Amino acid sequence: MQFVEFARSQTALRDAITAAYRRDERDCVALMMEQAAMPDTQVASIKALAAKLVAQVRKERTKSSGVDALMHEFTLSSQEGIALMCLAEALLRIPDRLTADKLIRDKISGGDWASHLGNSASLFVNAAAWGLLVTGKLVSSHSEQGLSSALTRLIAKGGEPLIRKGVDLAMRMLGKQFVTGETIEEALANGREREARGYRFSYDMLGEAAMTEEDAQRYLRDYEVAIHAIGKESNGRGIYNGPGISVKLSAIHPRYARMKHERMMAELLPRLKGLFLLAKQYNIGLNIDAEEADRLEISMDLVEALANDPDLNGFEGIGIVVQAYQKRCPYVIDFLIDLARRTGHRFMVRLVKGAYWDAEIKRAQVDGLDGYPVYTRKVYTDVSYLACAKKLLAAQDAIYPQFASHNAYTLSAVYHLAEGKDYEFQCLHGMGETLYDQVVGKGKLDKPCRIYAPVGSHETLLAYLVRRLLENGANSSFVNRIVDENVSIEELVEDPVAEAARFGGLPHNKIALPVELYGAGRKNSAGMDLANEHVLQKLQQALLASEQKAWLAAPLLADGNESANPAQAVRNPANHQDVVGQVQEASREDVELALQAAVRAAPVWAATAPAKRAEALDRMADLMEANMPALMGLAVREAGKTLNNAIAEVREAVDFCRYYAAQVREEFDNSRHPALGPVVCISPWNFPLAIFIGEVVASLAAGNVVLAKPA
């Protein structure tokens, strides 16, 4: 039985991408530092230009967009910033008004909004602060203190509904700052003034991952309508000089994942090809947006299929976004350069730093992976960006580089590295445009910049807005720091290679590896990355080997006794031809033997030192972890679980063993916690391993002998 679909035969370059995910962060950083290093004279020139850019941005700070100013005033390190974040992320998703009102009361009433009044030169921020000040009073005042009785009566009449309306209005205000237009026609019209100043655009139809096929078809139609509109607006200006479009693959298929590889090639690839053919018809560029790390390899398969499609021969508008914060980034670039040369294409490659860092860290921890796909220090990403920029610039025949960054040092470094080369800068609409106003146009650096311009209503803005706030609202964000006068220009334009050297390539000391998530006293259970081709190959071999084993479940009786009951076949519920193994049910005589043995063994086990019992549980955890594929195979074939559910089943059982081992090792004393004696554990059918193990090891850890009846 095949449990895992395989995408393709491995090539050396694709193998390098797969292997890099699991490389030690220190090795990756050392390599990137070596490749990003530049002569001292070049670094000095880069710093000088970056300092000049920062000084000019600060001089024109009063002209900065509402979003830039809002980011600085309400940082995510402040209570008010967090409150804003919670509201922006949650309020529009709450279906009932009562819950929405409770959230408003909880998140806004405790904020010190008055401390922000007058701190910013931006009317947008001051208006927001005044509104939040009044709103905060509205939801925190349940008496007349702090407000006049007239205002209190007004609040009593209006209450939270007024605030809900105010938050809706605030979201619309934010939408105007973050979104180029609610429709593609409006966005194109709004972009013409900046195009006249030398900017270019890549439009993105807002809409995150589709949850249903209906969602996916709606997003697909939006993209098709947008390509027609953009193509007509481009009016023959070409791929590089005219506007383009960016597409999220998760938006046009609800099951975009590596484990659905065959389905993606049959369903998603034709949809994507249709969009590319439409873009080719108008000769505009189409970029495939980067998403979470577990989708990288399936996206490379799709890109490879498109590049080899004869219907797209000669089209130079195939664009791919790559993320410098991923340890795999340089290997992805090597693969794309090779693929472009093999297929006669010139790819557009947009190099970004990455927008899902928090999620990647959390996912790796939750899934028990053996490392992180991303760097744990921001400066390492900055170093990786420079190393990857050099790679892209060295392959002008195969790559048209697009450098997306709001960091003045990064911008300046690319400008110096790319002298005489063909490339463009990119920035996000509503962020960092004051920086690129120093770049675009005659009398400045005179380099093109393409604005990544979201299009959609304020309702569709929410997920995008939250990601942008997380990405650019943090204290370490350059967008935040560039307008903070407390941060010196010298600090802002420091060479990231020199800064990284001071850390010695060491991972962040406050971000524990997934296995160390619970500290020194207890290991986290190990998971499996089912998006990694090497992991999938090993898993497939182990599952097939498990299938060949003759499994027998029989009563385990003391003194070598065996049950006399006949064995019965256990069949796979999804395939009755597949006999998983044989089972012998216990007879009354077997039960009596087990009871007698349990009574005899109880005093010995009760007197065993808790540390010894803990050691036994830890060994049990290690054995289950080592035999995870076999246990997974049984969970899939006998209980009908998916591979992901089977992994979770084994991991939960392992976690039970280690948790109870840690508890008794640290806190248990036989004299203060006497054993109960023999205990019977009967497990439910839906978690045949995890809950069964949890019941048994909890009793064993406490010094009880166990009579266990599995489902």
Image: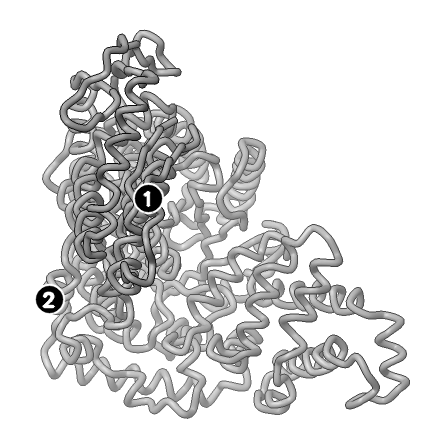
Q: Which mark is residue 416?
A: none
Instruction: Single out the mark in the foreground, 1 or 2.
Output: 1
Residue 320 in view in this figure: no
Question: From the image, which quarter does the C terminus lie in?
Answer: top left
Question: From the image, which quarter does the N terminus lie in?
Answer: top left
Identify residue type, mark 2. Answer: Ala
Residue 245 in view in this figure: yes
Q: Position of residue 47 (x, y in %)?
A: 24, 84
Q: Which mark is residue 677?
A: 1
Q: Taking 141 as reference, is 35 left or right?
A: left
Q: Taking 215 as reference, is 358 left or right?
A: left
Q: Which mark is residue 30?
A: 2
Q: Is residue 420 above or below residue 326?
A: below
The residue lying at 57 percent from left, 78 percent from top is 80
Q: Position of residue 19 (x, y in %)?
A: 15, 46
Tell me the crowding category of disc 2: few under 14, some 14 to 19, or many 20 or more residues within 10 angstroms, Cα based: some
Q: CA distance from mark 1 to mark 2?
A: 58 Å
Is 366 in front, or is 232?
Answer: 366
Q: Taking 517 as reference, is 211 left or right?
A: right
The residue lying at 35 percent from left, 27 percent from top is 265
Is 257 in front, or is 514?
Answer: 514
Q: Position of residue 710 (x, y in %)?
A: 35, 28
Q: Quadrant of residue 302?
A: top left
Closer to the chain start, of discs 1 and 2, is 2
Q: Is residue 697 above or below residue 41?
A: above
Q: Taking 31 as reference, is 683 left or right?
A: right
Q: SS class of the residue under badge 1?
A: loop
Identify residue type, mark 1. Answer: Gly
Q: Position of residue 683 (x, y in %)?
A: 40, 33
The residue lying at 61 percent from left, 63 percent from top is 175
The residue lying at 21 percent from left, 80 percent from top is 495
What scheme was used to colour the molecule? one colour
